Image: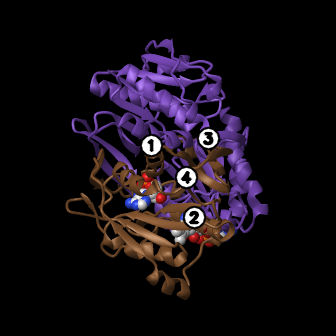
Chain colours: A brown, B purple
Amino acid sequence: MKILVCISHVPDTTSKINFTDGDTKFDTNGVQFVINPNDEFGLTRAMWFKEKQGASVTVVNVGGPETEPTLRKALAIGADEAIRINATPTDGYFVAKQLAEVAKDYNLIIAGRESIDYNGGMVPGMLATLIDANYVNNCIGLEVEGETATAVREIDGGKETLKTTFPLVIGGQKGLVEESDLKIPNMRGIMMARKKTLNITEPVSGDVATKAVFFEKPAPKGAIKLISPDNLDELVDLLHNEAKVI
Amino acid sequence: MSVLVYTETENGKLKKTALEVASYAKGVADMLGATVTAVTVNAESTNELSKYGVDKVLTVKNDKLGNFNAKAYADVLKQAAQKENSKVVIVSSSANAKFMAPILAINLNAGYASNVVALPESDSPFKVKRTAFTNKAFNITEISSEVKLIGLSKNAYGLKENNGAATEESFSPELNEADFSTEVTNVDKVTGKVTIADAEIVVSGGRGLKGPENWEMIEELADVLGAATACSKPVSDMGWRPHSEHVGQTGKPVAANLYVAVGISGAIQHLAGINASKVKLVINNDAEAPFFKAADYGVVGDAFEVVPQLIEKLKEFKANNA
Ligand SMILES: Cc1cc2nc3c(=O)[nH]c(=O)nc-3n(C[C@H](O)[C@H](O)[C@H](O)COP(=O)(O)OP(=O)(O)OC[C@H]3O[C@@H](n4cnc5c(N)ncnc54)[C@H](O)[C@@H]3O)c2cc1C
Ligand SMILES: Nc1ncnc2c1ncn2[C@@H]1O[C@H](COP(=O)(O)O)[C@@H](O)[C@H]1O
């Protein structure tokens, strides 16, 4: 089994989000970047396949040189090799098109349900369609036997089980593995990662269909109304007459 | 030209989000001087759609589409968009719609903007406002392709009545055998319970509740409010509650009318995921908990005292307002 894990390089979940250049660009100043959490679950599941079923694991990112530490971290967690497609990820379609060039050589492609920066939720589905692969989104469980896969998908109000075949792209999330299965790279992993190959390839030309042109922050919140625990009638009244939510 | 909208059903009935996307489609159509065509799959009745501004309903009836299948449904919508010459296609943010939309985007050569929260700011260039950085910001996205696909955030636009008369037309798109190479073998769905995705009110519990045995009062509170139950990440990590209840930046997003947080501190990752909710009520015994800075209403108190009392007050309220 040849597994490709798509890694999106995103601001750490605690980051303060700010913009520059007249609110047209994300301000990376002082921001710590990490492996997109959904992708980390996928990568960890890929490592499980490697250990238990014998798979090779390649990680890929579409991005500039600044994303290399993120790819190195994935190597330290245990991926065999990394590919960086040297382009600024302008929109989901552009990224999917770049990934499609690489993905053809793999039979299982693990991506995340969404990246926590632009929350597009579109790259894996677009990629699957471009390479004519099967696709399962919101994937919370994945088993493989030969060329057949059983995937569990979260749906609104429950889950469903799907049977499908390779080539397969999944959009994964927590559930693929448990939180406690996530690995923090150890010293040995970090040393080994330095010797692993990180290939840099050039992008193919691709159109951009969408463009983030401007950013805004949500309006600041008004002051909170505190209600005494001895006066819950007032709370019910406020929820009914003021907030009009009950 | 008509704006195409995918109006989802559940067990043959139109979902509430279907009426919301229909309302939104009408808003877009008015901007563009276009009509609204809705597509339904295996719907029992589509009458309601005319109330929300739909001019024409394409009804698809096919047993092969009994279970949701993203590729096949994308194929249905693609053919509908081509038949109607639609340049704008609108879908919801349900799990199924988000599964299907990227496939449809490629099939239609359409630029896709997900999590859109308002009517387009302008139609040429075509600009929409969407959430980004998990509700920590908004971004204005310009879609430059000829066909545009919009995924509307839940509860962002609301229902807008618009009386009209919709004509119904049965539509039989060609289905491709290859679309069925991914097959649903089992569906495991809680029935008779409000889901986080559809709920108007969500009641959520955190580590402050001490243990799974204390969730009875959370469920009872949810019950009186007709709400769905949710939880913070550590609560699901510890197995107190199922993963499907985990909300936040790495869990499910919540865009409810009312979000009630009990014993949740209000960490940035938690807030990011629930911030799109309109009104937030927090119950926490620590007045310094960060959640108090992000909420509209707050009770500083012990959940084990406040929640049972609140349940009683709400029952009284319901009895008086029934
Ligand atoms: C990468 C990453 C992603 C994350 N994603 C998410 C996410 O998606 N969702 C999420 O929720 N978290 C997420 N977290 C975790 C987050 O940082 C917090 O740790 C978590 O939200 C805290 O959960 P909590 O509020 O239930 O628990 P705590 O922080 O322990 O808070 C418990 C609260 O209960 C109150 N309390 C205690 N006793 C009582 C009582 N008797 N009555 C009333 N109140 C009481 C306390 O005052 C306290 O405020 C993420 C963290 C990381 C690093
Ligand atoms: N620049 C990128 N490089 C590699 N993979 C990506 C990139 N952007 C997104 N992905 C993958 O696609 C998933 C969904 O991202 P998105 O569609 O941007 O929300 C992510 O979880 C990644 O697995």
Mark 4 is surrounded, within 10 Å at the Cα level, by few (under 14), some (14 to 19) or many (20 or more) other residues, namely many
At 49% from the left and 18% from the top, the residue drawn is: B58
The numbered dot on residue A41 is 2
Nearer to us in this view, B112 or B46: B112
Q: CA distance from mark 4 to mark 3?
A: 12 Å
Query: In the image, what residue type sits under mark 3?
Result: Thr
Q: In this figure, which residue is indicated by the disc labeled 1?
A: B102
Picture layout, residue A183 above or below residue B261: below
Mark closer to the observer (3, 2): 3
Label 1 element class:
helix
Chain to which the residue tagged by mark 3 belongs? B
Q: Position of residue A49 (x, y in %)?
A: 64, 65
Q: Report the side of A14 relative to B316 (left or right).
A: left
Q: CA distance from mark 3 to mark 1?
A: 17 Å
Query: In the image, what residue type sits under mark 4?
Result: Ile
Query: In the image, what residue type sits under mark 2?
Result: Phe
At 42% from the left and 16% from the top, the residue drawn is: B55
At 49% from the left and 24% from the top, the residue drawn is: B39
Nearer to us in this view, A207 or B25: A207
Are discs 2 and 1 both within one chain?
no
The numbered dot on residue B182 is 3
Q: In this figure, which residue is indicated by the disc labeled 4?
A: A170
Q: CA distance from mark 4 to mark 2?
A: 12 Å
